[in-house]
Image (cartoon, rainbow, N blue to C red):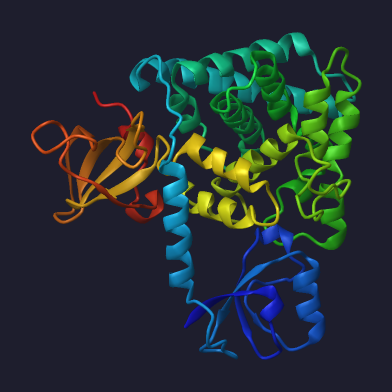
């Protein structure tokens, strides 16, 4: 039986099934092992790991600890309630109208980030007159229909991750700022910071940046230099603002002081840097990397919520959850009828009842004629079904983005 326990409850003889953190953020070679020394327990706590999953069939038990299923169900219910309350959905054009423009912006922005990285390796300053218009294009696309660009940016392969991650952080941060009603100039500056936040990775050797196995302490130390390196590179850029510099330097800081490079704690980290940290982690854990498979948006929001108790601002984390919603555009979902569908448009007042393009009958194991359902409506009025859960595209061997726009 798997149980969720706090790191303070760990004892020698327990079997660690999962350390509730990113694969790159703990001091052990593997995720699963039997605790045999006090030093191992100290390492877990010293790494600021809070929640741990233990396997009671392979080690000591804690009688009153919740099972993993119970803990996950409780968190899922809380996340769903938060994400569904006060949804922030404003679209000016349909998804179909915006998709083509969004695809062009995605390609242009990724190419720009690639150029910025190449120039940074040569010691060249960032040319703001080239970056600015791309940030403006991203912002305008988000204003027209945020689901189009954000949905397309969820498509990444391992080779272009570094570049598309920067574009994703830019777009997500713009959407986040917009949902909070921030001033236009602040949104632009935040988008600029999002697009340039990982510039320092240009100085990280490729064999470390793309390593498939766990990083050594020395390699991780090199990775941890990228915020400072990026800050130093951007300072060479004339007219660069304070906000992009702050986001670049501090997007890896954490509320409990466990981040880097300055170990800033709550009260010292700016609001926009805290927002960038949430966005950065969300995009990273939902993306396929050379060393891990990306998780669904719903799972990622659950992790953000759990980690916000220590690492992120809880209020900002909850606002972000409402911004992206529990079922973002592009999410593959299972309906009560047994049909698979892809979310194509959130509902303005209920994010649990979006518009969905259905295309596959799982009971009969056949593709069906694609159809758009509005889950907020009753049977006979274009709806009559409801989401049971999100699904893994890998499990069903489908590309949901093929069905984002019906012919």
- Residue 76: image quadrant is bottom left
Between 367 and 57, the residue placed more toward the observer is 57
Residue 281: image location, x then y, percent: 64, 46
Left or right placement of residue 116 versus residue 123 in this view: left
The x and y percentages for residue 296 are 46, 49
Q: Quadrant of the C terminus?
A: top left
Residue 334 visible? yes
Q: Is residue 392 toward the left or the right of residue 309 in the image?
A: left
**Is residue 390 rendered to the left or right of residue 122?**
left
> Residue sitting at 46 percent across and 55 percent down?
78
Viewer-closest of 245 and 126: 245
Quadrant for residue 19, please give it. bottom right
Which one is in front, 69 or 228?
A: 69
Find residue 93 and report its horizontal and vertical position in percent.
38, 15
* In this view, 145 is above or below 259: above
In the figure, residue 135 lies in which quadrant?
top right
Q: Is residue 33 above or below residue 289?
A: below
Side of 364 relative to 181 (left or right): left
Q: Residue at x 75, y 40 (%)?
A: 251
Note whether residue 294 is visible: no
Residue at 61%, 32% in the rendered image? 164
């Amino acid at each position: 039986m798997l149980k969720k326990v706090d790191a303070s409850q760990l004892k020698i003889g327990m079997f660690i099934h999962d350390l509730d953190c990113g694969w790159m953020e703990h001091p052990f070679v593997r995720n699963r092992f039997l605790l045999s020394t006090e030093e191992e327990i100290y390492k877990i706590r010293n790494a600021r790991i809070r929640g741990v999953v233990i396997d009671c069939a392979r080690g000591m038990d804690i009688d009153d600890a919740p099972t993993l299923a119970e803990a996950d169900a409780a968190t899922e219910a809380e996340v769903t309630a938060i994400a569904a309350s006060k949804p922030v959905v404003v679209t000016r054009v349909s998804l179909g109208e915006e998709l083509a423009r969004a695809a062009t912006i995605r390609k242009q922005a990724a190419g720009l980030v690639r150029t910025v990285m190449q120039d940074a390796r040569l010691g060249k300053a960032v040319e703001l007159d080239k970056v600015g218009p791309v940030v403006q294009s991203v912002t305008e696309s988000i204003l027209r229909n945020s689901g189009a660009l954000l949905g397309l940016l969820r498509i990444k392969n391992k080779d272009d991750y570094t570049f598309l991650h920067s574009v994703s952080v830019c777009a997500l941060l713009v959407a986040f700022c917009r949902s909070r009603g921030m001033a236009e100039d602040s949104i632009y500056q935040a988008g600029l910071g999002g697009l340039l936040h990982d510039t320092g990775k240009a100085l990280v050797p490729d064999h470390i940046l793309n390593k498939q196995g766990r990083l050594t302490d020395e390699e991780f130390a090199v990775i941890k230099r990228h915020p400072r390196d990026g800050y130093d590179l951007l300072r060479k850029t004339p007219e660069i603002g304070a906000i992009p510099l702050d986001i670049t330097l501090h997007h890896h800081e954490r509320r409990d002081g466990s981040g880097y490079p300055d170990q800033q704690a709550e009260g010292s980290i700016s609001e926009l840097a805290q927002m960038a940290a949430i966005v950065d982690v969300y995009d990273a854990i939902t993306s396929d990397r050379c060393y891990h498979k990306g998780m669904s948006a719903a799972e990622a929001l659950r992790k953000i919520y759990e980690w916000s108790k220590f690492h992120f601002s809880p209020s900002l984390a909850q606002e972000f959850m409402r911004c992206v919603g529990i079922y973002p555009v592009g999410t593959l979902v299972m309906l009560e009828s047994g049909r698979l569908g892809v979310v194509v448009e959130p509902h303005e007042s209920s994010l649990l009842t979006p518009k969905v393009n259905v295309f596959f009958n799982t009971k009969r194991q056949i593709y069906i004629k694609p159809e758009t359902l509005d889950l907020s409506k009753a049977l006979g009025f274009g709806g009559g079904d409801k989401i049971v859960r999100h699904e893994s595209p890998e499990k069903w061997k489908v590309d949901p983005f093929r069905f984002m726009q019906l012919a």
